[in-house]
Amino acid sequence: MNNNSPHNPRSQARSAARLAAVQALYQHQMEGTGEARLLDEFHQHRLGMTVDEEEYADAEVDFFDDLVKGALARTDEIDELVAGKLAAGWTLARLDKTMLQILRGGTYELLARADVPVAAAISEWVDVAKAFFDDREAKFVNGVLDAVARDVRA
């Protein structure tokens, strides 16, 4: 059985973890919510819950925690990698704040999660981008993460 099948419960749980990680990283950036409080809030009230009639899928909690903690701990390193892949004249500050969190999460996964194949990780983060943006932005995520992967997974 293909482990990346959309019908695979682990794959679905990891997809949900990635989406939740973007939301958590966004909340951290916008509100300055501390890591421990942020993780606790997501564990208690978001992951696998229904909030304002919006159902949050069951997420792989350990994977979610690793994405959030890792992206926060390595933000400077991640931002340097991402900034180096942007077109001339573009800075991280010019990126949409949700887009920045998608790129941070994806870059962290490429850096630190050798257990996830490059193609699978990029494909998953492109899917996360599609939850927020149009195809053009999803292709942008694909291009940036592909370039990052060439540097960090050589």
Image: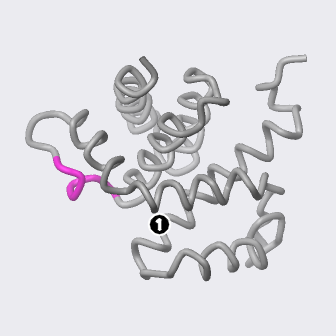
Q: Residue at x 88, y 40 (%)?
A: 9
Q: Secondary structure at mark 1?
A: helix
Residue extent of the magenta highlight: 91-96
Mark 1 lies on residue = 26
Reply yes or no: does residue 28 show up in magenta.
no
Q: Residue at x 37, y 30 (%)?
A: 148
Asked whether 134 or 145 is in front, the reply is 145
List x then y, in percent, for residue 98.
43, 58
Give the position of the N terminus as an image quadrant: top right
Residue at x 70%, y 78% (from the top left corner): 40
**Dot 1: few (<14), some (14–19), or many (≥20) neighbours within 10 Å?**
some
Tell me the kind of residue under disc 1. Tyr
Residue 77 on image: x %, y %: 32, 48
- Report x, y in % for residue 143: 37, 26
- Asked if 154 appears above or below 131 in the picture, the reply is above
Residue found at x 17% / y 34%: 87
**Image quadrant where one finds the C terminus:** top left
Relative vertical location of residue 45 with respect to residue 74 in this rendering, above or below: below
**Residue 29 picture quarter:** bottom left
